[in-house]
Image (tube, rainbow, N blue to C red):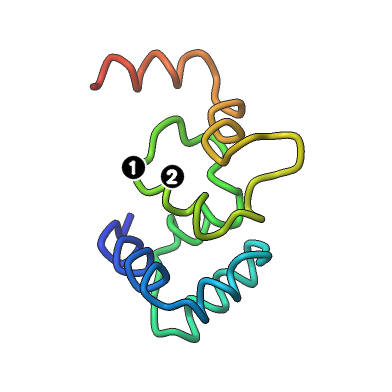
């Protein structure tokens, strides 16, 4: 995964009120389109994370920032993107991640 490109995107959005405003209600494909128009080239893995709303990802340092700048990415009924994505993980995923810390 291109972590650096995702980190650069997060920093840019936090500094650009116009982009942040556009992302506030954006859904996955629109987020990717806005990012591409701004010059960001996400790897397939990063694009997949947006499209799947971080489903199956137990832990990701950037997920909290994405939750903040793209709040509409969190599905209805969940408090945060972390709550949603962790709910899609199997018990094996959570144990594996915990052991690797």
Question: Exactly how many numbered labels are in the figure?
Answer: 2
x, y (%) of residue 35? Answer: 48, 76
Identify the element where label 2 is drawn: helix
Above/below status of 78 relative to 13:
above
State the quadrant of the C terminus. Answer: top left
Mark number, residue 92? none
Identify the element where label 1 is drawn: loop
The one of 26 and 39 positioned closer to us in this rendering: 26
Above/below status of 94 relative to 79:
above
For marks 2 and 1, give the one nearer the viewer: 2
Q: Count neighbours of disc 2 (C-alpha within 10 A) and say few if under 14, some if 14 to 19, many if 20 or more.
A: some
x, y (%) of residue 80? Answer: 58, 38
Q: Residue furthest right?
A: 76
Mark 1, residue position: 61
The Cα–Cα distance between marks 2 and 1, rounded to whole angstroms, is 7 Å
Q: Quadrant of residue 97?
A: top left
State the quadrant of the N terminus. Answer: bottom left
The one of 75 and 20 positioned closer to us in this rendering: 20
Q: Quadrant of residue 95?
A: top left
The residue at the point 45 percent across, 62 percent down is 44
Above/below status of 5 relative to 3:
below
Mark 2, residue position: 64
x, y (%) of residue 30? Answer: 64, 72
Q: Count neighbours of disc 1 (C-alpha within 10 A) and say few if under 14, some if 14 to 19, many if 20 or more.
A: few
x, y (%) of residue 42? Answer: 40, 68
Kindly indicate whether the residue at mark 1 contacts the one at mark 2 (C-beta within 8 angstroms). Answer: yes
The residue at the point 60 percent across, 56 percent down is 51
């Amino acid at each position: 995964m291109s972590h650096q490109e995702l980190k650069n995107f997060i920093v840019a959005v936090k500094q650009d009120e116009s982009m942040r405003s556009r992302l506030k209600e954006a859904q996955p494909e629109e987020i990717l389109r806005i990012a591409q128009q701004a010059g960001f080239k996400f790897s397939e893995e990063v694009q997949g994370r947006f499209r799947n709303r971080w489903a199956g990802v137990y832990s990701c340092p950037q997920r909290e920032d994405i939750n903040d700048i793209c709040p509409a990415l969190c599905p209805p009924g969940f408090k945060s993107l972390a709550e949603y994505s962790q709910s899609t993980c199997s018990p094996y995923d959570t144990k594996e991640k915990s052991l690797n810390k």
